[in-house]
Image: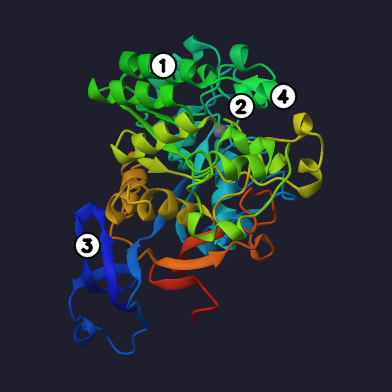
Amino acid sequence: MILTGGRLVDPASQFDAVADILIVNGKVAAVGADLAGQAPNPVQRFDAKGLVVCPGLIDLHVHLREPGQSAKETIATGTASAAQGGFTSVVCMPNTSPAIDNAGTVALIRERAERESKINVFVTGAITKNIAGEELAPIGSLKSAGVVAITDDGHCVQNNDLMRRALEYARMFDLPVMDHCQDYSIVMDGVMHEGYWSAVLGLHGWPASGEEMIVSRNILLAELTGAHVHCQHLSSAGSVQLLREAKKRGIPVSGEACPHHFTLTDTSLAGSEKFWSADGTEIMADHAGARPRWPAYDTNFKMSPPLRSAADRAAVIEGLCDGTVEIISSDHAPHCGYEKEVEFDYAPFGIVGLETELALSLMQLYHSKKMSLSNLIAKFTVHPARMLRLAGKGTLGVGADGDVTVFDPGQEWIFDCKTSASKSRNTPFAGWMMKGKPCATIVNGAIVWQDRDRK
Ligand SMILES: [Zn+2]
């Protein structure tokens, strides 16, 4: 396959220029000007003129819900949604039922993904048996079964000694540990950010310190054990500052941020009118008349960690811009409609995100002129690939896997969640005007998804 005339952005090799890319036998064979002459015959051609061509995007935080929760999502639908969002690889979380806490379940997911997914699925294993936080999972056998990291995501190991042992084993087996940072004794039954709006709305608060306490703990344990700890979906200014200082001291820690945390704030919980007139004034400013409406207490704005204050949002963006936070993920967390259509306190935490992730990131970071396109793409490609040591991924260097994402950074479109490939519809971004759209998702040199409007 040959892609011609696109703006090729490969942060791993600091390449950013108009160029062709030739993929032969599923691997990148050449990158450069006018490669058409070198292409074998017959060859599949893709005219990428006016489009960005980059290494296949990787989302390292996705809930595919299989086994056990296939009413919410399946490997087939979740990965189809990822492909539609421009992702060629996803990393799935182990909080399924049963949990992915043993080699047999890892094998089951990998076999099923082999059959039912057109994109790459990497699997994480649990830190503790049944994600109960009491007893370590068999970390060595999870590693032999092929997991790329361990995490109890959705939950957080509260016992610091157990977490220390987990890090010691993880280091021995050369596995990064990813952590959902939540101190249960502080967060209790909190459902939204603790602050002005939780008081006004009468909802229990989930204070930022509930996250920061565990980020601090993880930094101390990473320093003690030498294991790599990756803090998932960071939402607060304090967390970003802790991570910044720890990295300066050379401690092996990293962090990720999600588009909802750097786009929305806790004001969203008071309804769209309050949001657009306060924290949302700069978002979709050119399309102020087309801004979607939603009521107060909308459960599609409930996730964990929760949407935080405008100052936290600004700090997360600053952390992304100065390199403290190296990775962007969706935390794609599908739930059935009936599960979310309940009182705010009773709704499950989480939103879908794979199909809005690239556009929201482009809008908040690139179109806002806060970050270069290459820096943004690095957070979806070379950085997650390096952290998880995904061989052949995250770059378009010669010999790398032929995984490519093609997108139009300037295309405006409205996100209609009825057209989503996911099984679930729990998104706060329904009806939003987006800027930046995937055009084609290519895995091993084959197109696995293409925007129908462009074909
Ligand atoms: Zn989580």
User: Which residue is found at the position 32% from the left and 44% from the top?
Assistant: 383
Distance from the alpha carbon under mark 2 to that under mark 1: 21 Å
Distance from the alpha carbon under mark 2 to that under mark 3: 43 Å
Q: Which mark is residue 216?
A: 1
Q: Residue 331: horizontal and vertical position, in percent?
A: 54, 42
Image: 307 above or below 1: above
Q: Residue 303: horizontal and vertical position, in percent?
A: 62, 35
Q: Is residue 381 visible?
A: no
Q: Is residue 156 visible?
A: yes
Q: Is residue 203 left or right of residue 356?
A: right
Q: Quadrant of ligand 1?
A: top right
> Which residue was labeled with disc 3?
16
Q: Nearer the viewer, residue 42 or 384?
A: 384
Q: Which mark is residue 131?
A: 2
Image: 378 above or below 297: below
Image: 82 above or below 265: below
Q: Nearer the viewer, residue 260 or 448?
A: 260
Proximity of marks 2 and 1: CB atoms separated by less than 8 Å: no
Q: Which mark is residue 157?
A: none
* Nearer to us: label 2 or label 4: 4
Proximity of marks 2 and 3: CB atoms separated by less than 8 Å: no
Q: Is residue 400 left or right of residue 415?
A: left
Determine the secondary structure under disc 4: loop
Snapshot quadrant of residue 28: bottom left
Q: Nearer the viewer, residue 271 or 151?
A: 271
Q: Residues within 10 Å of mark 4 (few under 14, many from 20)?
A: some
Snapshot quadrant of residue 422: bottom right
Inspect the image, locate mark 4, and give the three-letter code of the amino acid beneath it: Leu
> Which residue was labeled with disc 4?
203
Determine the secondary structure under disc 3: strand
Disc nearer the start of the sequence (1/3) = 3
Inspect the image, locate mark 3, and give the three-letter code of the amino acid beneath it: Asp
